[in-house]
Amino acid sequence: MKYGIIYYGYNTEEYVVDSIAPFLERDNFVVSAVSVPFLEYRDVDDLEDSTTDILRELVAQRKLRYLVDRPRFVQEHEARNHALAHLSKYNVDYIWLVDSDEIYTEDQIDQICEYVEADQGNFFKLSLKNFVFDKNHYLEEPFCPPRIFKTKVDNLPLYGFYWDNDIAYFEALSRNLFSYEKMKGMKTIPPEVAFIDHYSWLNNEIGKRKVAYQLKHFGHCSYKWNEEKNILEFNEEFYKKTNTEIPEVKRND
């Protein structure tokens, strides 16, 4: 199987090398990276780090095939579609989404590929080990977002992203788009196969910026940044409004 990797990394310089490296040396992988600020950062983009420069250097070294670093301040799905347009040249079987705060090992990638190729399914969720506050604690329940999508389902070709990470397929006769969510074949690759470290909500500047982004993008966030203590915390008001329990946190022994 041939995989097209859409890698997104911006303002995550402490993770970017470790997260992209395992995907770069595989003959059946084509990596198309994106490093642009999304629209929500237009008036707060004063914290830009070296992530984009690191990725540009990988392109210069011919380790990374392609990088989208323009245009800036576009919606998330628009940025990913620029990377997808490049991958369309390579006749890949699956599109695999990788964010720069997701840290895979070589063995985990091998195990995921074996699972996908044995199953031949349409879509796959991955089990992410969601670290919170620091790298010694993670949420008890895995975070399982859709990450791997077949490029043709029921003879319908993949069309592109229409919202964030959400993908649609195109029916030529009717000229209709079909969201993957309305199509059959979603599987979850369990943690026993691959449990991916996800540095999503750590008590650092990346976590602080992510809270600000989610508030702008969604209008709410399950975390908050305590300005007085200068730390990341669960947002208790969010859980009260949504009538849900604050997640259980486990120690990473």
Image (cartoon, rainbow, N blue to C red):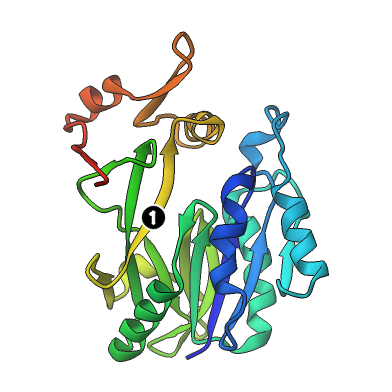
Q: Furthest residue to the right?
A: 60
- Residue at 48%, 29% (x, y): give it: 215
x and y, in percent, of residue 109 in the image: 42, 75
User: Amino acid type of disc 1?
Assistant: Asp
x and y, in percent, of residue 42 in the image: 70, 34
Q: Is residue 97 above or below residue 50?
A: below
x and y, in percent, of residue 159 in the image: 54, 74
Res. 179 visible in picture: no
Q: Is residue 75 above or below residue 40?
A: below
Q: Is residue 8 above or below residue 75?
A: below
Tally of numbered tags:
1
Look at the numbered disc 1 and give the secondary structure of its residue: strand
- Residue at 27%, 73% (x, y): give it: 193
In this figure, which residue is indicated by the disc labeled 1? 197
Res. 151 visible in picture: yes
Name the image quarter holding residue 60: bottom right
- Residue at 59%, 67% (x, y): give it: 21
Q: Quick one: 32 or 70, which is closer to the camera?
A: 32
Q: Quick one: 90 or 107, which is closer to the camera?
A: 107
Q: Furthest residue to the top?
A: 228
Q: Is residue 215 left or right of residue 115?
A: right
Badge 1: how crowded within 10 Å, few (<14), some, or many (20+)? some
